[in-house]
Amino acid sequence: MKRLLILTIAYCTATATYGQLFDTSAAQTELVATLLGTGRVFTANVTVKRENGVKQIKIADNVMFLRDGDLRIEHNSTAESALAKLTAKLKKNNLAGVVTILLPKTNQAYLLIPGKRAYLESPSEKTVAPHMESKFLRAETESGHLCTVRRVTVTGADDSSQQIIIWEATDLQGFIIKSQMDRGDNTNEILLFTSIRTEIPDDSKFIVPPSYNKLKGHPLKKLPS
């Protein structure tokens, strides 16, 4: 999973090092899914924003599917601020939207590139589960929902730590509708969950379409036209 998620740096939508501590939307989304629990089944829109002081930009409009621990994230980069030129270039080359599928039960991870009808495959790297501690901060209303706000500290096997603040909606059985992670450069990355649907995602969301070509190496090199 680590190698696969690192490849998404090129798309401005998600980067990560699985098993280490996270500073990106893909890893943060995966962590939120873990905190929600494997029993959750839902589909939700996920807006990704970056905040530095009073400045805030939207970097992605994603869709997340979760079913018994299996996770699909459809990454769709936006064209705001410094990301505008790169996002425009990616869209021109049919690379602005990518899909990550993580299947922990079968130890597989996939990066799909719909615009090229291609995909990368990587076995998920087995790592020691991080230690998590939670601290209640306050109760407040977020997006019309009364929420319990908690700070979760994630400590890795190398004793490095990362904190994420989560907003759990009490009227949605503790569903996390917002999360905020410190990127370590005076910037916070924020995920906002909306349009939450509790129907079971279709099986097709967690498989590679048979018409897709399997790629080797970096996805920006020698893609099929």
Image (spheres, rainbow, N blue to C red):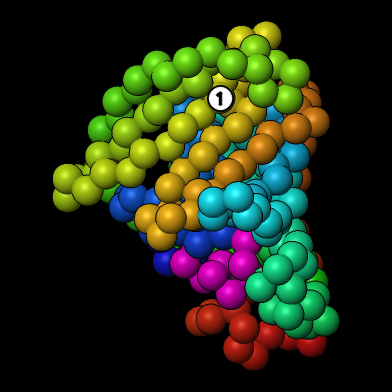
In this figure, which residue is indicated by the disc labeled 1?
Answer: 167
Q: Is residue 9 magenta?
A: yes
Can see residue 210?
Answer: no
Q: Is residue 187 above or below residue 28?
A: below
Magenta highlight: main SS = helix
Instruction: Give the camera-side residue of 195 and 58.
Output: 58
Query: Residue at image x 70%, y 45%?
Result: 47
Q: Is residue 84 above or below residue 127?
A: below
The single residue placed furthest to the front in the displayed view is: 54
Task: Choose top left, top right, bottom left or bottom right for residue 150.
Answer: top left
Task: Choose top left, top right, bottom left or bottom right for residue 96.
Answer: bottom right
Query: Residue at image x 65%, y 12%?
Result: 146
Q: Is residue 29 above or below residue 170?
A: below
Which span is picked out in magenta? 5-13
Query: Residue at image x 47%, y 15%?
Result: 138
Q: Is residue 179 above or below residue 181?
A: above
Query: Residue at image x 46%, y 44%?
Result: 181
The single residue placed furthest to the bottom in the displayed view is: 222
**Element assignment for label 1:** strand
* Residue 83 % position (x, y): 67, 71
Q: Quadrant of the N terminus?
A: bottom left
Instruction: Give the camera-side residue of 200 and 37.
Output: 37
Q: Is residue 224 left or right of residue 178?
A: right
Can see residue 182?
Answer: yes
* Residue 5 % position (x, y): 49, 62
* Residue 175 % position (x, y): 61, 21
Q: Amino acid at mark 1?
A: Trp
- Disc 1 packing (10 Å; few <14; some 14–19; many ≥20): many
* Residue 167 % position (x, y): 56, 24
Q: Is residue 19 left or right of residue 206?
A: left
Q: Is residue 67 left or right of residue 31?
A: right
Q: Quadrant of the C terminus?
A: bottom right
